[in-house]
Image (cartoon, grey):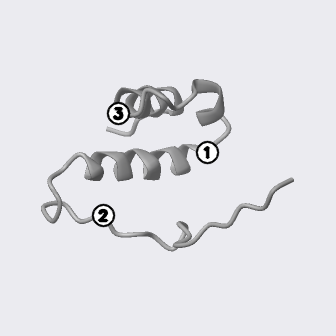
Amino acid sequence: MMLNKSQLIDAIRDLNSSADRAWLGLFTRDELERYLQHLQHAQQPRGESPWQRTSETQAIMVRHAA
């Protein structure tokens, strides 16, 4: 069953309660689904459920001060 955007945000907040609902709302449904999958894999013991980075996910992110 495919979750809608609101359901994805609820599921993400169940695993990451510090994620702000309004901030999550800025992302697309697909981006939220990828993030939820990442959080779910992170709940598994290391090595049991390997998470594979998709081509949409950058390996290195850089942030510059404003």
**Tags 1 and 2 touching, CB below 8 Å:** no
Which quadrant of the figure contains the N terminus?
top left
54, above or below 19, in the image = below
Q: Badge 3: few (under 14), some or many (20 or more) residues near its Cα, within 10 Å?
A: some
48, above or below 1, in the image = below
Q: Earlier in the sequence, mark 3 or mark 2?
A: 3
Residue type at tag 1? Thr
Q: Is residue 63 left or right of residue 17?
A: right
Residue 51's mark?
2
**Tags 1 and 3 touching, CB below 8 Å:** no
- The residue that appears at 15% across and 65% down in the rendered structure is 47
Residue 51 in the image, given as x and y percentages of width and height: 30, 64
Q: Is residue 65 left or right of residue 49?
A: right
Q: Is residue 15 left or right of residue 24?
A: left
User: In whole angstroms, how far apart are the C-alphas of marks 1 and 2?
Assistant: 20 Å
Residue type at tag 3? Leu
Residue 49 in the image, given as x and y percentages of width and height: 18, 60
Dot 1: element: loop
Which residue is label 3 attached to?
15
Which residue is label 1 attached to?
28
User: In whole angstroms, how far apart are the C-alphas of marks 1 and 3?
Assistant: 19 Å
- The residue that appears at 52% across and 33% down in the rendered structure is 5
Q: Earlier in the sequence, mark 1 or mark 3?
A: 3
Residue type at tag 2? Trp
Q: Badge 1: few (under 14), some or many (20 or more) residues near its Cα, within 10 Å?
A: few
